[in-house]
Structure formats: structure tokens, C-alpha cells
Image (tube, rainbow, N blue to C red):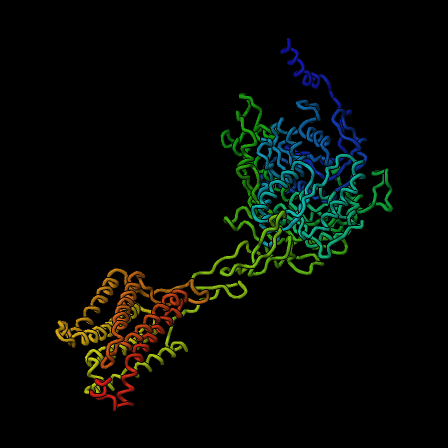
């Protein structure tokens, strides 16, 4: 029984139409604003040209015509209608597209209202009742619309039932993956995600890190705010404020928005952020202009520099007719993202020849004309009588651009391409049919009878047995438009044309000019999608600095880095100076960076300066002083040696073992010449020589003193009657002591050279501004073994001399050797801590002065008294005198 009732209800409309000559649906809303041009195939469109504010809104009853009293024209959007009319006219005049088939169109207005949107969408494929056809036959192939995202979704709810392709020209794909998308929808605009990246790149380009955000209080505004805020935080950009404009649904609500808009305007103007991102749709711009106007009339504190408004592509600069006369100075220098467009030849001519007396089915033109030119047509609008009648001589080009623009906007360009995309898809569909069936008589007429979701009726006994939908052809459509650009749909059924970036220049007559200053090109190479020409941008006239700064606090100068403020946003920070060893060459560096090893920071910590290569040389005063001292004592030593050689036969020389004395003086001379090796550039040979020569020469020197002391002791012991030590006294003992002691040091040095010898090295860290060239000792342990062995010999010599100091004075050098060893040990004991506490070339200087001081001590303590006797007191240099003493 249920199946029978359903069958009867399904067949009832068809039965009624078969037995009734005519039927009417007068109780439904007759949408007063429509533009219809008949054709073999129709393109439907839903424009957003007129704004209606209802006193209430519900879906419990049918909306009638008299319920639309508060109508406000949005003049700029009238261009959208003309773009479709112009495209259809070009297609019909082109014999290469759909030959012998005439395209028509049927345009309704959505009135920015959901109820009207649903009813107008229903009226495009049928007579407002789904699946019901009465008299009116429509070969509707596709529908273009809507301008706003919400309108597009409402349209898709109806069009999906009919499987009619929907080409949106102003809305963007939803970013929420859980939000369902229409399976029949094609987008003539890029995805909104590309606009996000464009906004971020724009802010980074000018260094704007402290910006404001104003978005609508709807799902789109919430999604935009959350997505953009996440992207901004990743790039180090903060929101100074984030305000939401309340959504107005009814006419009465506009009277209660005054305080809300004034509060938002005050927040914007009192903020330090010079840049404000404004997101919304066409209706949002109408509210935004009202907010600015109310704010300027109110007592609101304003920043003297003005603001840079960054407008999104959906928020096209529109105005109601009464808003055209409002001052536009506040928008001077605004930066707007816009759907990519290009100049279409012939379109401006169409705008210039518009005549309200030649409407030809255009139900929008007269009301638009009355609104923008403040005139009236007799009998057309009885509610208001204008001061003068419309003559038709008025020109659109005379209107300020805040009301109407003569250049094709991005939305008009998208709508123009949408009409061509539909035509090309139909054309390819027809060619596909003829490819398989051939061109037969009546084939074109069959094409005109197609439904929007069919290529032909699904009947096997028709002329052509095909079951292809229009969608596959529309997905693959690709063509070059009259502007020379290729139009095709991407993988997600959206045209990837990118975005244009424009700078707005306003004039006192409320007109403005858009100057293209940049582009978000989706077809560019990776990393080059965003481009901008700074020289073309015109900034607000009140800016004292261009481009303006929009930061939370002044930039940290070079030489300092950012330091986060406790409890503040990460874009707000203090500036801390760089540490001693780091620099920051740029402003606003997050952290200071260290210089390379061969550089050091300058005084201001802004750049790295090459370090000076430093080593002890002959040229500098310290080196010259050392050379002078070294040569002076060398000459003294040579002089002493000459004196001893000249007076070699005198008792005082003979008594002190001449050969051992000559050896001692010779190695003392070498000790004084050793510092000259330390003054040579640190190279492999010099590094090997300086410590080895120093160790060996001083070992021989101390060994000679030890041999002298032992010889003196044994000489006095051997003189005692019956002493067995007499056989040890002689030159052989002294030579044996010197050679054996020296061989031990030679062994230590040999091990040092064989295992870890000294090598040239550079010290870049001890002194901040210098690279110290020196010799690395290689094995520090063996270096101190050399010094330790020398110290051991000196101590032994000191002890032996100390015990021999009370021997008879004749021929006894023990006292002098004791004093000289005391000086020698004192110098080298103090050398160790001083050497370890100094850096760079001063370490070398300390070692050189220790060598010179100890050598001079030996020379003066041992040989000064003898030279005094030999030269000044020759009377005491006789055997009897020495024996007597």
C-alpha cells in the first residue's frame, strides 16, 4: 500500500501538467530583481548586488515580495552582472565555440539573505518546487555563484540535488576538513591557504611583528583567525589585538551596533600596532566602513601616523550608495589582496554604453541607475521622488571609484572565466558525442534538450546512446581566454591563478586607484611565489617613516639581543647587551653570536675584527731590549774569556782549572745567545732548537760548576797525608763529570724529540684580541724533566759548594759557587709560577729573562772577583800571596 501511495504522489505532478493548459504559482516569491536572456542552453547565476535587511528571519512561512522593503544597492557589484552578460555575448559571437547554439543566462539576486538564496536557487532549474516542471522549460547547464562563502554553501545544498555544476567566483574552499564540500562545486578562485602565506610573507617583508586583526563573527572568521594566528606565531609575529565584528541578521540590530563598532574602532586606534589585518566578505566591508565612519565622528583617540589596512581578497572594497560620499582618507595606502585579474578587451566599452532605457530584460539596471545618479524613472519607484528625472545621458565613468570601478575587478574576471569554462566544457562534450556517433541530422537539437547532468536522455533507443555527465568535461577543461591567460581547474577543482596585491591611492573626491604592487603566483618556482615592488607602494600621508614600523617595542640595536619580558607576549622584549665574546651585527637578534677563532668583537659588539698575530720579535721594544741585553752580556763573557786566555799563566787562572773555566765561559756565552733563538718566528726548526739548546747549554754550564766544586773539595781532601783521593784529582775527573751529566740531559732530550717534540702552535683564546704564535712544548712532562734535571744539578752543586765553603780560602771557589747556585735556584724557582701565570709572548719573555738573569748571576758571582784581581790588583795575583791567604 505504501509503495502505491508513493507512486501516485510521484506521478501526480506529471498528470496535472498533462491535463492542464497552464498552471501558476503566484503564492511563491517573485524575485523582483532578475536578468533573463533566453537561449538554447542557459547559464544561471546568483549575484549579490542588493542588500536587504529584514526585520526578522525564519523559514516557517513563504517569503513574499512585500517583505523586502529595506533594499540597498551595492553599486560596485553591478559590474559582476555585466561581466557575465559580456562573456555570454562574446561566446555567442564566436563561431568556434558551440556553433549554431545560443547561450542564454538567468540571473537572480541573493540579497545577502539565506531565505532568498534558497528560493532563488530553486527558481533557476525549476519553478521553485523540486522535481516539478510546469510550462517553463529551462535547459540549465551550470550556475555561477555565489560571491560569499555562506551563499555558496546555501546554493550547493539545492544544486547538489540536481547535480548542476556550481562555479563559485568569490568564495574560498573551507579549511576545516570536517566541513563537507559540494560534489558539484568548482571554484574560480584559489584556495584560501595561499592567501594566508601571502599575508605572512607581506608582514615578514616589512618586518611587521606587532599587528592587529579584525574578523567577522562567523565560522569563516573563526577559521581565519585560528589558522593565521598559528602561522604568525611560527614566524615570530604577534597579534596586538584580535577583534570580532558581530554578525547582524536583522534590520533592527544595526541600531544597536553603534557602541560595539565604536569600541572596536577605539581599540584599533589606541593600539601601537600600525598594521591591521581585516578579514571578511562583501557585507563585512559595508559594516567596516560604517564602523570607521562612526569612529571618526566620535571622540576617539587616534594615532597621528595612521594605519596600514591589509584587506583580504574576499573583502572587496565596496560601499552602499549612501556610503559613496564618505571620506576615504583613512584607507589611503591600504594594501589589498585581490583575486588575480587581467584587462579584458572590450569590457570597458560595454560599461561606457550602458543605457537604462535599453534594459532588455535587465531587472537590475534602473534601480542601480537611480541609486548611483540620484535620479528617478517615472512610475518605477513610487516610494521616493528624486529631485530630477534620469535622462540616460549619465555615464558610469563619471562616478567615483568608491561607487563603481571601470576596470574589471578580480571577482568580475573570475565570473567572466566561469562563463567561458562552462561554454568550453559544453563544446568539448558535444565534440565527444560527435566523435563516437558522427554528426547526424538533429544532433544539435538533441544537445539543446540535455539536462544539466546529462549529455542526453538516458535512453538506449535515442539517436545517440551516451550517458556522459557534464562534470568530467568541466574538470578537464583548459582554454586561453581573451586576456591571453590559461584557465584550468586544479586537482581540487579550483583555479590556481594566485592573488594580486594592490595599493590603494585615494583622492579628495572619494575616488581611488588600485596600483598592483605584488603577486602571490602559485605557478612560480618554490620560494619565489611571493613578490612585491616596494617602489610602487604609496603609504598613508601621515606616516613620518615609510615603510612604517609596527612592532611592540623599538628594535634592539646591533650589539644587543632580545630578552623576553616576563608575562608579556614573545614579540615584546627588552634589549640586553651581548656578552664579552659575542656580537650581534643586526637589529633584533634573538641571540648574540660568537666570532670565529681568528676574530674578536669590537668595542660596540657589532662586528668581528681580525685578531693581530702576535709573537716576540726583534722589531718591538721588548725584543730590542732583550737583544741588547743578550749581546751586552755576550760581549762581557767574551771579554772575560779573552782576559783569562791572556792571563792563563797567572796563578789565579791556573788554580781554577783553566780548561774547565774556558768551557764554562764558552757555554755561558751560548747561554746569553740562546734568547736570540726565542726571538725568531715560531717555526718547526726554531721550536725544536730553542728548548733543546736551552736545556743542553745550561746543563753543561751547571755541570762545569759542579765539576769545579767537586774538584775543589777533592783537592783539599787529597792534600791530607795518606789520602787515597789523590788519584781522583785531575782533569779527567772534571771532564768525566761534565760529560756524564750532560749525556743524561742529552738522553732526556732525545726521548723528548722522539716521542712528542715541540711544534709551532697558535693560541687564539688566551688573549682576546691576539693570535699568539708560539711553540707548543709537545710533552709538558718531558719539558719539566729537562728543567727538573737542571735544577737537580744546581741543587747538588749548591750543597757541595755549601759544605766546601769553610775550606781554606786559597784557590777555593766554593763560596762564589754557593752564591751563584743560590741565585740560579732562586731565579728558576720563581720562574715556574711566573711562567704559568703569563700569556702570549710574555711567557717567552719570562723564560728569556730567567735565562739572562741566571746566566748573568753565574758570570758575575764567579768571574767578577777574579777579573777584579787580574785587572785591578795584579799584585795579589802571585803564588805567595794566594798561599798566604
Residue 584 vertical placement versus 618 (above, below): above
Query: Which residue is at the front of the view, 632 or 457?
Result: 632
Q: Is residue 515 visible?
A: yes
x, y percentage for residue 216? 69, 40
Q: Residue furthest bottom?
A: 875
Query: Which residue is at the front of the view, 847 or 769?
Result: 847
x, y percentage for residue 535? 61, 59
Q: Quadrant of residue 365?
A: top right
Q: Quadrant of residue 71?
A: top right
Query: Which residue is at the front of the view, 593 or 207?
Result: 593
The quarter of the image holding the C terminus is bottom left
Q: Is residue 82 visible?
A: no
Residue 701 vertical placement versus 310 (above, below): below
Q: Residue furthest top?
A: 1
For image coordinates 59% across by 58% down, the residue present is 556
Query: Which residue is at the front of the view, 315 or 356?
Result: 315
x, y percentage for residue 395? 76, 49
Residue 170 vertical placement versus 327 (above, below): above
Query: Left or right: 335 with respect to 25?
Result: left
The quarter of the image holding the N terminus is top right
Query: Left or right: 160 with respect to 580?
Result: right
x, y percentage for residue 29? 76, 28
Q: How many numbered marks does the figure carry?
A: 0
Residue 180 vertical placement versus 323 (above, below): above
Q: Quadrant of residue 542?
A: bottom right
Q: Residue furthest front?
A: 721
Amino acid at each position: 500500500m505504501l509503495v502505491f501511495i508513493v507512486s501516485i504522489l510521484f506521478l501526480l505532478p506529471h498528470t496535472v501538467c498533462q491535463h492542464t493548459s497552464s498552471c501558476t504559482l503566484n503564492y511563491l516569491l517573485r524575485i523582483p530583481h532578475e536578468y533573463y536572456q533566453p537561449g538554447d542552453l542557459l547559464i544561471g547565476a546568483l549575484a549579490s548586488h542588493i542588500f536587504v535587511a529584514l526585520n526578522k528571519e525564519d523559514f516557517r512561512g513563504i517569503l513574499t515580495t512585500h517583505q523586502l522593503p529595506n533594499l540597498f544597492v551595492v553599486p560596485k557589484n553591478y559590474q559582476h552582472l555585466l561581466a557575465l552578460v559580456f562573456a555570454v555575448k562574446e561566446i555567442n559571437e564566436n563561431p568556434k565555440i558551440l556553433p549554431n547554439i545560443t547561450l542564454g543566462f538567468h540571473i537572480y539576486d541573493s540579497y545577502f539573505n539565506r531565505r532568498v538564496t534558497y528560493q532563488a536557487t530553486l527558481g533557476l532549474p525549476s519553478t521553485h518546487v523540486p522535481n516539478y516542471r510546469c510550462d517553463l522549460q529551462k535547459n540549465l547547464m551550470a550556475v555561477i555563484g555565489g560571491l560569499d562563502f555562506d551563499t555558496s554553501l546555501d546554493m550547493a545544498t539545492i544544486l547538489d540535488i540536481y547535480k548542476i555544476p556550481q562555479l563559485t567566483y568569490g568564495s574560498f574552499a573551507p579549511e576545516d576538513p570536517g566541513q563537507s564540500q559540494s560534489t558539484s562545486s568548482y571554484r574560480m578562485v584559489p584556495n584560501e591557504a595561499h592567501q594566508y602565506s601571502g599575508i605572512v610573507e607581506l608582514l615578514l617583508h616589512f618586518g611587521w611583528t606587532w599587528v592587529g586583526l579584525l574578523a567577522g563573527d562567523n565560522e569563516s572568521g573563526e577559521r581565519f583567525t585560528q589558522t593565521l594566528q598559528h602561522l604568525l606565531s611560527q614566524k615570530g609575529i604577534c597579534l596586538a589585538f584580535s577583534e570580532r565584528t558581530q554578525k547582524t541578521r536583522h534590520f533592527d540590530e544595526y541600531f544597536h551596533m553603534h557602541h560595539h563598532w565604536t569600541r572596536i574602532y577605539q581599540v584599533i586606534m589606541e593600539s601601537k600596532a600600525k598594521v591591521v589585518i581585516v578579514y571578511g566578505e562583501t557585507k563585512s566591508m559595508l559594516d567596516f566602513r560604517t564602523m570607521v565612519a562612526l569612529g571618526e565622528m566620535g571622540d576617539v583617540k587616534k594615532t597621528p601616523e595612521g594605519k596600514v589596512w591589509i584587506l583580504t581578497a574576499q573583502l572587496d572594497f565596496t560601499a552602499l550608495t549612501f556610503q559613496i560620499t564618505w571620506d576615504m582618507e583613512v584607507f589611503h595606502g591600504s594594501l589589498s589582496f585581490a583575486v588575480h585579474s587581467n584587462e579584458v578587451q572590450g569590457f570597458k566599452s560595454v560599461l561606457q554604453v550602458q543605457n537604462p532605457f535599453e534594459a532588455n530584460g535587465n531587472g537590475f539596471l534602473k534601480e542601480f541607475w537611480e541609486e548611483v545618479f540620484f535620479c528617478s524613472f517615472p512610475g518605477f519607484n513610487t516610494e521616493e521622488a528624486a529631485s530630477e528625472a534620469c535622462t540616460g545621458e549619465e555615464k558610469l565613468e563619471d562616478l567615483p571609484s568608491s561607487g563603481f570601478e571601470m576596470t574589471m575587478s578580480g571577482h568580475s574576471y573570475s565570473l567572466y572565466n566561469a562563463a567561458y569554462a562552462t561554454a568550453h566544457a559544453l563544446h568539448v562534450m558535444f565534440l565527444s558525442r560527435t566523435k563516437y556517433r558522427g554528426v547526424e541530422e538533429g544532433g544539435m537539437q538533441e544537445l539543446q534538450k540535455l539536462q544539466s547532468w546529462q549529455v542526453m536522455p538516458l535512453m538506449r533507443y535515442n539517436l545517440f546512446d551516451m550517458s556522459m555527465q557534464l562534470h568530467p568535461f568541466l574538470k578537464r577543461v583548459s582554454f586561453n581566454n581573451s586576456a591571453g591567460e590559461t584557465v584550468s581547474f586544479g586537482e581540487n577543482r579550483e583555479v590556481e591563478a594566485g592573488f594580486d596585491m594592490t595599493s590603494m591611492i585615494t583622492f579628495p573626491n572619494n575616488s581611488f586607484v588600485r596600483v598592483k604592487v605584488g603577486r602571490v603566483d602559485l605557478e612560480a618556482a618554490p620560494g619565489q611565489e611571493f613578490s612585491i615592488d616596494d617602489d610602487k607602494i604609496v603609504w598613508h600621508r601621515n606616516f613620518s617613516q615609510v615603510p612604517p614600523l609596527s612592532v611592540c617595542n623599538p628594535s634592539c640595536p646591533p650589539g644587543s639581543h632580545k630578552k623576553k619580558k616576563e608575562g608579556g607576549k614573545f614579540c615584546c622584549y627588552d634589549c640586553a647587551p651581548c656578552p664579552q665574546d659575542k656580537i650581534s651585527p643586526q637589529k633584533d637578534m634573538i641571540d648574540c653570536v660568537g666570532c670565529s677563532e681568528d676574530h674578536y668583537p669590537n668595542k660596540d659588539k657589532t662586528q668581528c675584527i681580525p685578531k693581530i698575530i702576535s709573537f716576540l720579535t726583534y722589531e718591538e721594544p721588548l725584543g730590542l731590549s732583550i737583544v741588547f741585553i743578550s749581546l751586552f752580556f755576550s760581549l762581557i763573557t767574551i771579554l772575560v774569556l779573552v782576559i783569562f786566555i791572556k792571563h792563563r799563566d797567572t796563578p789565579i787562572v791556573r788554580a781554577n782549572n783553566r780548561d774547565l773555566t774556558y768551557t764554562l765561559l764558552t757555554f755561558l756565552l751560548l747561554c746569553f745567545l740562546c734568547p736570540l733563538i726565542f726571538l725568531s718566528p715560531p717555526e718547526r726548526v726554531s721550536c725544536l732548537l730553542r728548548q733543546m739548546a736551552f736545556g743542553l747549554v745550561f746543563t753543561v754550564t751547571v755541570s762545569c760548576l759542579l765539576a769545579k766544586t767537586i774538584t775543589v773539595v777533592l783537592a783539599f781532601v787529597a792534600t791530607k797525608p795518606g789520602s787515597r783521593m789523590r788519584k781522583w784529582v785531575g782533569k779527567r775527573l772534571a771532564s768525566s763529570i761534565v760529560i756524564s751529566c750532560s749525556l743524561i740531559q742529552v738522553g732526556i732530550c732525545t726521548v723528548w724529540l722522539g716521542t712528542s717534540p715541540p711544534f709551532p702552535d697558535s693560541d687564539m683564546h688566551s688573549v682576546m684580541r691576539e693570535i699568539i704564535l708560539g711553540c707548543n712544548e709537545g710533552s709538558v712532562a718531558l719539558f719539566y724533566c729537562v728543567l727538573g734535571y737542571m735544577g737537580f744539578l744546581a741543587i747538588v752543586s749548591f750543597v757541595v759548594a755549601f759544605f766546601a765553603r769553610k775550606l781554606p780560602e786559597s784557590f777555593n771557589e766554593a763560596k762564589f759557587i754557593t752564591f751563584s747556585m743560590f741565585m740560579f735556584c732562586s731565579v728558576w724557582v720563581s720562574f715556574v709560577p711566573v711562567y704559568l701565570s703569563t700569556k702570549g709572548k710574555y711567557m717567552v719573555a719570562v723564560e728569556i729573562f730567567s735565562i739572562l738573569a741566571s746566566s748573568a748571576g753565574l758570570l758575575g758571582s764567579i768571574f767578577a772577583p777574579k777579573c777584579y784581581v787580574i785587572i785591578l790588583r795584579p799584585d795579589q795575583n802571585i803564588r805567595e800571596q794566594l798561599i798566604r791567604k
